[in-house]
Amino acid sequence: MQRVPEAELMEELEQARAYAEADFNEANTLFVDSFVQSFGKGLKGRGLDLGCGPADIVCSLAKINPEMKFDAVDGSEVMLDWARRNISRQALADRIYVLNCYLPCHDLPVDRYSVITSNSLLHHMREPRDFWQMIVDYSEPGTKVVVMDLLRPADTDVASFLVGQYTADAPDILRSDFYNSLLAAYRPDEIDAQLAEAGLSILQVQDVSDRHWLVSGQIG
Ligand SMILES: C[S@@+](CC[C@H](N)C(=O)[O-])C[C@H]1O[C@@H](n2cnc3c(N)ncnc32)[C@H](O)[C@@H]1O
Protein backbone atom coordinates (compact mmCIF):
# COMPACT_ATOMS: atom_id res chain seq x y z
CA MET A 1 0.00 0.00 0.00
CA GLN A 2 1.25 3.47 -0.86
CA ARG A 3 1.84 5.91 1.97
CA VAL A 4 -0.83 8.59 2.52
CA PRO A 5 0.61 11.61 4.42
CA GLU A 6 -1.40 13.01 7.34
CA ALA A 7 -1.51 16.42 9.02
CA GLU A 8 1.61 17.35 10.98
CA LEU A 9 0.60 19.06 14.21
CA MET A 10 -2.14 17.74 16.51
CA GLU A 11 -3.68 21.11 17.25
CA GLU A 12 -7.39 20.41 17.73
CA LEU A 13 -8.52 20.54 21.35
CA GLU A 14 -10.52 17.29 21.16
CA GLN A 15 -7.78 15.54 19.22
CA ALA A 16 -5.14 16.41 21.81
CA ARG A 17 -7.49 15.48 24.67
CA ALA A 18 -8.34 12.09 23.14
CA TYR A 19 -4.65 11.38 22.57
CA ALA A 20 -3.55 12.54 26.03
CA GLU A 21 -6.29 10.58 27.80
CA ALA A 22 -5.80 7.38 25.77
CA ASP A 23 -4.10 4.35 27.26
CA PHE A 24 -0.79 3.98 25.41
CA ASN A 25 0.74 2.01 28.22
CA GLU A 26 1.69 -0.96 26.03
CA ALA A 27 3.49 1.13 23.38
CA ASN A 28 5.07 3.46 25.94
CA THR A 29 6.36 0.50 27.97
CA LEU A 30 7.76 -1.05 24.81
CA PHE A 31 9.64 2.20 24.12
CA VAL A 32 11.02 2.61 27.63
CA ASP A 33 11.92 -1.08 28.03
CA SER A 34 13.77 -0.99 24.69
CA PHE A 35 15.64 2.11 25.84
CA VAL A 36 16.67 0.41 29.09
CA GLN A 37 17.63 -2.78 27.30
CA SER A 38 19.97 -0.84 25.01
CA PHE A 39 21.39 1.74 27.40
CA GLY A 40 20.43 0.88 30.99
CA LYS A 41 19.20 3.36 33.60
CA GLY A 42 20.80 6.08 35.71
CA LEU A 43 22.33 7.96 32.78
CA LYS A 44 23.67 11.51 33.03
CA GLY A 45 23.50 14.45 30.65
CA ARG A 46 20.74 16.20 28.72
CA GLY A 47 18.08 14.50 26.61
CA LEU A 48 15.92 15.71 23.73
CA ASP A 49 12.47 14.24 23.07
CA LEU A 50 11.16 15.20 19.63
CA GLY A 51 7.36 15.45 19.22
CA CYS A 52 6.81 14.86 22.95
CA GLY A 53 3.00 15.13 22.83
CA PRO A 54 1.59 14.77 26.37
CA ALA A 55 5.09 13.86 27.63
CA ASP A 56 4.32 10.39 29.00
CA ILE A 57 7.49 8.84 27.58
CA VAL A 58 9.84 11.67 28.53
CA CYS A 59 8.43 11.58 32.10
CA SER A 60 9.21 7.84 32.32
CA LEU A 61 12.71 8.44 30.96
CA ALA A 62 13.29 11.25 33.47
CA LYS A 63 12.20 9.01 36.35
CA ILE A 64 14.59 6.19 35.47
CA ASN A 65 17.41 8.69 34.86
CA PRO A 66 17.14 10.99 37.90
CA GLU A 67 20.34 12.87 37.09
CA MET A 68 19.24 13.80 33.56
CA LYS A 69 17.45 16.89 32.27
CA PHE A 70 15.31 16.84 29.13
CA ASP A 71 14.06 19.25 26.50
CA ALA A 72 10.60 18.09 25.41
CA VAL A 73 9.69 19.62 22.05
CA ASP A 74 6.39 19.80 20.20
CA GLY A 75 4.80 22.29 17.80
CA SER A 76 1.26 22.04 19.18
CA GLU A 77 0.46 24.39 22.05
CA VAL A 78 -2.67 22.42 23.03
CA MET A 79 -0.61 19.24 23.25
CA LEU A 80 2.03 21.07 25.27
CA ASP A 81 -0.64 22.14 27.78
CA TRP A 82 -1.22 18.44 28.45
CA ALA A 83 2.54 17.91 28.66
CA ARG A 84 2.98 20.71 31.21
CA ARG A 85 0.14 19.38 33.39
CA ASN A 86 1.53 15.85 33.22
CA ILE A 87 5.06 17.00 34.04
CA SER A 88 4.00 19.10 37.04
CA ARG A 89 1.69 16.36 38.34
CA GLN A 90 4.75 14.11 38.43
CA ALA A 91 6.91 16.85 40.00
CA LEU A 92 9.36 16.82 37.09
CA ALA A 93 9.15 20.47 36.01
CA ASP A 94 12.64 21.16 37.36
CA ARG A 95 14.13 18.58 34.94
CA ILE A 96 11.85 18.54 31.88
CA TYR A 97 11.70 21.80 29.91
CA VAL A 98 8.81 22.09 27.49
CA LEU A 99 9.53 23.91 24.23
CA ASN A 100 7.08 24.92 21.54
CA CYS A 101 9.04 24.39 18.29
CA TYR A 102 7.84 23.50 14.84
CA LEU A 103 10.32 20.91 13.61
CA PRO A 104 12.79 21.03 12.07
CA CYS A 105 14.16 23.85 14.20
CA HIS A 106 17.70 25.02 14.75
CA ASP A 107 17.52 27.06 17.91
CA LEU A 108 17.25 24.50 20.67
CA PRO A 109 18.84 25.55 23.98
CA VAL A 110 21.69 23.04 23.74
CA ASP A 111 23.94 22.26 20.73
CA ARG A 112 24.48 18.58 21.47
CA TYR A 113 22.39 16.07 23.44
CA SER A 114 23.54 12.86 25.11
CA VAL A 115 20.18 11.18 24.48
CA ILE A 116 17.70 11.79 21.63
CA THR A 117 14.31 10.06 21.64
CA SER A 118 11.14 10.28 19.60
CA ASN A 119 7.95 8.24 19.46
CA SER A 120 5.32 8.49 16.76
CA LEU A 121 6.51 11.78 15.26
CA LEU A 122 8.27 10.81 12.03
CA HIS A 123 5.14 9.77 10.14
CA HIS A 124 3.66 13.23 10.80
CA MET A 125 6.56 15.19 9.38
CA ARG A 126 6.35 16.55 5.87
CA GLU A 127 9.93 15.61 5.04
CA PRO A 128 11.55 12.60 6.77
CA ARG A 129 15.01 13.93 5.88
CA ASP A 130 14.39 16.87 8.22
CA PHE A 131 13.71 14.50 11.10
CA TRP A 132 16.93 12.49 10.70
CA GLN A 133 18.93 15.67 10.06
CA MET A 134 17.79 17.00 13.47
CA ILE A 135 19.36 13.89 15.00
CA VAL A 136 22.57 14.44 13.02
CA ASP A 137 22.70 18.13 13.97
CA TYR A 138 21.99 17.72 17.69
CA SER A 139 24.02 14.59 18.41
CA GLU A 140 27.67 14.00 19.22
CA PRO A 141 29.77 10.83 19.34
CA GLY A 142 28.15 8.60 21.97
CA THR A 143 24.65 10.11 21.77
CA LYS A 144 22.09 7.40 22.50
CA VAL A 145 19.19 7.35 20.06
CA VAL A 146 15.82 5.59 20.31
CA VAL A 147 13.10 6.32 17.75
CA MET A 148 9.87 4.35 17.49
CA ASP A 149 6.96 4.81 15.13
CA LEU A 150 4.04 3.02 13.54
CA LEU A 151 4.60 0.56 10.75
CA ARG A 152 2.45 0.96 7.62
CA PRO A 153 0.32 -2.17 7.18
CA ALA A 154 0.07 -4.11 3.91
CA ASP A 155 -3.35 -2.70 3.03
CA THR A 156 -6.31 -0.74 4.37
CA ASP A 157 -8.04 -3.93 5.60
CA VAL A 158 -5.14 -4.61 7.94
CA ALA A 159 -5.18 -0.95 9.03
CA SER A 160 -8.90 -1.21 9.88
CA PHE A 161 -8.28 -4.48 11.71
CA LEU A 162 -5.56 -2.84 13.85
CA VAL A 163 -7.83 0.11 14.64
CA GLY A 164 -10.52 -2.33 15.82
CA GLN A 165 -8.00 -4.38 17.76
CA TYR A 166 -6.28 -1.55 19.64
CA THR A 167 -8.76 1.33 19.82
CA ALA A 168 -12.11 -0.49 19.98
CA ASP A 169 -13.54 1.63 22.82
CA ALA A 170 -11.71 4.87 22.00
CA PRO A 171 -13.37 8.13 20.86
CA ASP A 172 -13.96 8.39 17.09
CA ILE A 173 -11.31 11.09 16.70
CA LEU A 174 -8.61 8.84 18.18
CA ARG A 175 -9.72 5.93 15.98
CA SER A 176 -9.57 8.02 12.82
CA ASP A 177 -6.22 9.57 13.84
CA PHE A 178 -4.83 6.06 14.41
CA TYR A 179 -6.11 4.89 11.01
CA ASN A 180 -4.63 7.94 9.26
CA SER A 181 -1.34 7.50 11.12
CA LEU A 182 -1.08 3.85 10.04
CA LEU A 183 -1.54 4.92 6.40
CA ALA A 184 1.08 7.67 6.83
CA ALA A 185 3.63 5.45 8.54
CA TYR A 186 6.85 4.14 6.99
CA ARG A 187 8.02 0.57 6.57
CA PRO A 188 11.36 -0.66 7.97
CA ASP A 189 12.95 -0.89 4.49
CA GLU A 190 12.05 2.78 3.92
CA ILE A 191 13.57 3.65 7.30
CA ASP A 192 16.74 1.80 6.37
CA ALA A 193 17.00 3.90 3.21
CA GLN A 194 16.33 7.12 5.17
CA LEU A 195 19.06 6.22 7.70
CA ALA A 196 21.54 5.48 4.91
CA GLU A 197 20.77 8.78 3.21
CA ALA A 198 21.26 10.67 6.49
CA GLY A 199 24.58 8.93 7.16
CA LEU A 200 23.02 7.19 10.18
CA SER A 201 23.43 3.56 9.12
CA ILE A 202 25.05 2.91 12.47
CA LEU A 203 21.50 2.92 13.88
CA GLN A 204 19.54 -0.32 13.57
CA VAL A 205 15.87 -0.67 12.68
CA GLN A 206 13.76 -3.64 13.77
CA ASP A 207 10.09 -4.60 13.97
CA VAL A 208 9.04 -4.61 17.63
CA SER A 209 5.30 -5.28 17.42
CA ASP A 210 2.57 -5.92 14.87
CA ARG A 211 2.38 -2.13 14.34
CA HIS A 212 5.70 -0.60 15.39
CA TRP A 213 9.31 -0.45 14.29
CA LEU A 214 12.11 0.85 16.48
CA VAL A 215 15.47 2.40 15.66
CA SER A 216 18.19 2.39 18.27
CA GLY A 217 21.90 2.77 18.57
CA GLN A 218 24.70 5.09 19.52
CA ILE A 219 26.15 7.77 17.27
CA GLY A 220 29.70 6.82 16.31
C1 LIG B 1 1.32 10.99 17.73
S1 LIG B 1 1.91 12.28 18.72
C2 LIG B 1 3.17 11.47 19.66
C3 LIG B 1 3.39 12.11 20.99
C4 LIG B 1 4.38 11.43 21.93
N1 LIG B 1 5.71 11.33 21.37
C5 LIG B 1 3.90 10.09 22.38
O1 LIG B 1 4.54 9.09 22.07
O2 LIG B 1 2.88 10.03 23.06
C6 LIG B 1 2.86 13.25 17.58
C7 LIG B 1 3.21 14.62 18.12
O3 LIG B 1 4.14 15.25 17.21
C8 LIG B 1 3.77 16.61 17.04
N2 LIG B 1 4.28 17.06 15.74
C9 LIG B 1 3.95 16.59 14.52
N3 LIG B 1 4.64 17.22 13.56
C10 LIG B 1 5.44 18.13 14.18
C11 LIG B 1 6.39 19.09 13.73
N4 LIG B 1 6.69 19.25 12.44
N5 LIG B 1 7.02 19.84 14.67
C12 LIG B 1 6.74 19.70 15.97
N6 LIG B 1 5.85 18.80 16.46
C13 LIG B 1 5.21 18.02 15.57
C14 LIG B 1 2.25 16.62 17.16
O4 LIG B 1 1.76 17.91 17.51
C15 LIG B 1 2.01 15.56 18.24
O5 LIG B 1 1.97 16.11 19.53
Image: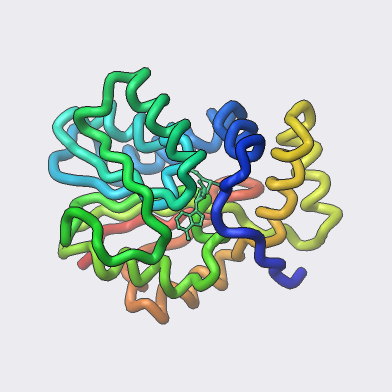
Q: Who's the residue at 61% across and 37% down the image?
A: 13
Instruction: Report x, y in % for residue 130.
Output: 42, 71
Splitting the image into 4 quarters, where does residue 175 fall? top right
- State whether residue 29 is above or below residue 181: above
Q: How is the image coloured?
A: rainbow
Instruction: Report x, y in % for residue 190.
Output: 56, 72
Q: Nearer the viewer, residue 138 or 187?
A: 138
Q: Nearer the viewer, residue 207 or 57?
A: 57
Instruction: Report x, y in % for residue 142.
Output: 17, 58
Q: Nearer the viewer, residue 107 or 220?
A: 107
Q: Quadrant of the N terminus?
A: bottom right
Furthest-right residue in this view: 157
- Figure label count: 0
- State whether residue 215 is above or below residue 17: below
Q: Who's the residue at 74% across and 72% down the image?
A: 2
In the rendered structure, the answer to whether residue 214 lies left or right of residue 142 reads right
- State whether residue 8 is above or below residue 162: below
Q: Quadrant of the C terminus?
A: bottom left
Q: Who's the residue at 74% across and 50% down the image?
A: 179
Instruction: Report x, y in % for residue 87.
Output: 35, 27
Q: Who's the residue at 17% across and 59% down the image?
A: 112
Q: Nearer the viewer, residue 76 or 202?
A: 76
Furthest-bottom residue in this view: 197
Splitting the image into 4 quarters, where does residue 16 fall? top right
